[in-house]
Amino acid sequence: MNTMPSRALRPQLQGTLLMCVGVACLSANDAIAKILTSGYSPLQILFLRNVIALPFTVGIALFMGGRAALRSHRPAAHLLRGALWVGATMMFFTSFIYLPLAEATALIFVAPFFITLISALFLGEDVGWRRWLAVLAGFLGVLVIIRPGGAAFQLISLLPVATALVYALLMLSARWVDRRESVWTLLVYLTGTGALLSALIVPLVWVPLRAGDLWLFAGVALFGTAGMTMMTQAFRLAPAVIVAPLDYTGLLWATLFGWLIWRESPDAIMIFGAAIIVASGVITIRRGQKQAGP
């Protein structure tokens, strides 16, 4: 009996499961952060999330990659990535104050389109016409959701879109990191530099912590670290073309959390716009993987 196909599928199934659970964890992280924005600055939430998560991140890196995972050959690149991380997270958390969770989540999913644009216009990468059409369709989905010129338009709706742009720069900046460094090194330094940079300005917005909120801050750190770790491992176990589109399941979790906690219900126009973004994003990812080759 030939067991090779089943053995080959096992890592893919593990990667798929890890990706789905990891996305759910990050969605829980976002929901808890939205709860905390009612009493704390997004900067303070980000600072405490990174400080609490840092020891766990270091432990995971040591377990997965040994001491070499803590060594950086280009610390300046990590510092710049940390600045991008702080900026993107602050904007995203700020959008939670004004927007439903599902809407903010749907809009940040335009990041793959920005990656495609930047790669084509500034990095000289070849982008086929199908990917260009997918990018245009994705931004059409953004226009459907934010409804510029309509009575429901809010300027703050552009904040998750700006977050997606900075996040795209963060993803592309991984190319500046030394190739000898593992993904676990990137994870440690992203958390560490995020904590360091936010610590410089968090005294300006600091408010005393309420004892009853400590478990919420711990939850943000726990779910955020677990989600990033599982998603990282998912890409190591299964092809990106399989696991990357599963990131869009976060929209389902955001909708569920939004309804359970705040009774937020996306309207038909928002759902239609989100569907355009998701479909276009999946096409962009799959075409990108096909052009990149095996």
Image (spheres, rainbow, N blue to C red):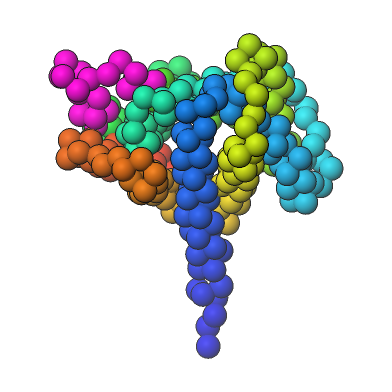
Q: Quadrant of residue 174?
A: top right
The answer to whether any part of residue 240 appears in the image is: no
x, y percentage for residue 177? Answer: 67, 28
Q: Residue drawn 37% across and 31% down?
A: 104
The answer to whether any part of residue 209 appears in the image is: yes
Give the extent of the magenta segment: 141-159
On screen, residue 269 above or below 154: below
x, y percentage for residue 277? Answer: 29, 37
Q: Residue drawn 58% across and 28% down?
A: 45
x, y percentage for residue 214? Answer: 64, 38
Of residues 57 and 70, which is closer to you in this image? 57
Q: Residue drawn 27% across and 19% down?
A: 154
Position of 193 compared to 146: left or right?
right
- Is 136 covered by the magenta stretch? no
Q: Quadrant of residue 144?
A: top left
Position of 7 compared to 165: left or right?
right
